[in-house]
Amino acid sequence: MSKKVLVTGGTSGIGRAFVDVFAKSGHEVWFTYLNASENSKEVSKSYDVGKVIDFKLDLADHDSVKSFVETLPGVPDVIIHNAGLGSKTVERVANTPHEQAEALIKVNAIGTLWLSNLLLPKMLERGSGKIILISSVGGGITQFTGFSYADGMSKAAVAFLGRSLGADLAQSGVEVFTICPGATDTPMFRASTLDALNDAERKLVIASLPKFRLIDPSEIAELGLFLTTEAAKILHGAVLDASMGLGSNPGLLLK
């Protein structure tokens, strides 16, 4: 049965993969973007008319979050809280270190909480729904030396939210899961880890990873698709280490 799927941050990386996987699986997808530069209309036009719809959303602005929820054409069956900032992409929206720390916490954690608080009551009233939060292996599962404290703190907060919602909703019709991706081939990971390296250094970092490769965004999206099935109900409340083993052995990631 076709579901209404909301993906925040759906124009690139893992979010874009979620849009693609769910749209190609026959679902109606609503995705968000922040800036016109993200070319959201190009994403929408990649699918049949009306199949994929874009919405502007600024998770750092409560008025924007509230307006967005009021604009939605219905209550989503699936919410994928994917949008967020990374330790380098935050530099596009904030200049000083303290402003960047504030933006990371506000967008990744507080904005996600705001959106959840506005949408969850509607799902509970209906009696069903799936919530998938995207955290990170860094913060959600373990920690790495040399990375942004605020970034890791924000991802830890997302994982905590997933655990807390899992506890509170255990006897409801709404299921909750948290995915903590590892080193994934996205613009965010390239900006934070790979772009400052030369070719030899990049090859060394990738060779140090589990399975000697980056995770493809589609692999995370396929996991998300599985979590919306009946078979995934036994994982309600789980914080899933989707890092191919990096969470078990964080020392593999060379800096």
Image (cartoon, rainbow, N blue to C red):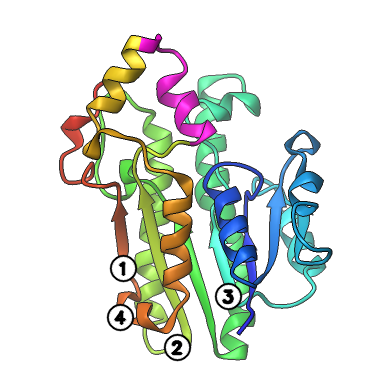
Residues shaded magenta = 186-199
Amino acid at the residue labelled 1: Ala
The residue that disc 3 covers is: 120
Residue 193 percent across, percent down from the top left = 40, 24
Q: Main secondary structure of the magenta part?
A: helix
Between marks 4 and 2 in the image, the one whose residue lies nearer the viewer? 4
The residue that disc 4 covers is: 234
Label 4 to label 3: alpha-carbon separation:
20 Å
Label 1 to label 3: alpha-carbon separation:
18 Å
Residue under the point 63% across and 78% down:
3
The residue that disc 1 covers is: 238
Label 4 to label 2: alpha-carbon separation:
14 Å
Residue 46 is left or right of residue 125, and the answer is right
Q: Is residue 196 magenta?
A: yes
Is 68 or 61 nearer to us in this picture? 68
Between marks 4 and 3 in the image, the one whose residue lies nearer the viewer? 4
Dot 4 or dot 2: first in sequence order is: 2
Residue 58 percent across, percent down from the top left = 70, 47
The residue that disc 2 covers is: 172
- The quarter in which the N terminus is drawn is bottom right
Circles 4 and 1, Cβ within 8 Å, touching? The answer is no
**Please, is residue 179 above or below residue 107 in the view?**
below
Amino acid at the residue labelled 2: Ser
Label 2 to label 3: alpha-carbon separation:
11 Å
Label 4 to label 1: alpha-carbon separation:
9 Å
- The quarter in which the C terminus is drawn is top left
Amino acid at the residue labelled 3: Leu
* Res. 148 visible in picture: yes
Circles 4 and 2, Cβ within 8 Å, touching? The answer is no
Is 215 or 71 nearer to us in this picture? 215
Mark 1: secondary structure: loop
Amino acid at the residue labelled 4: Ile
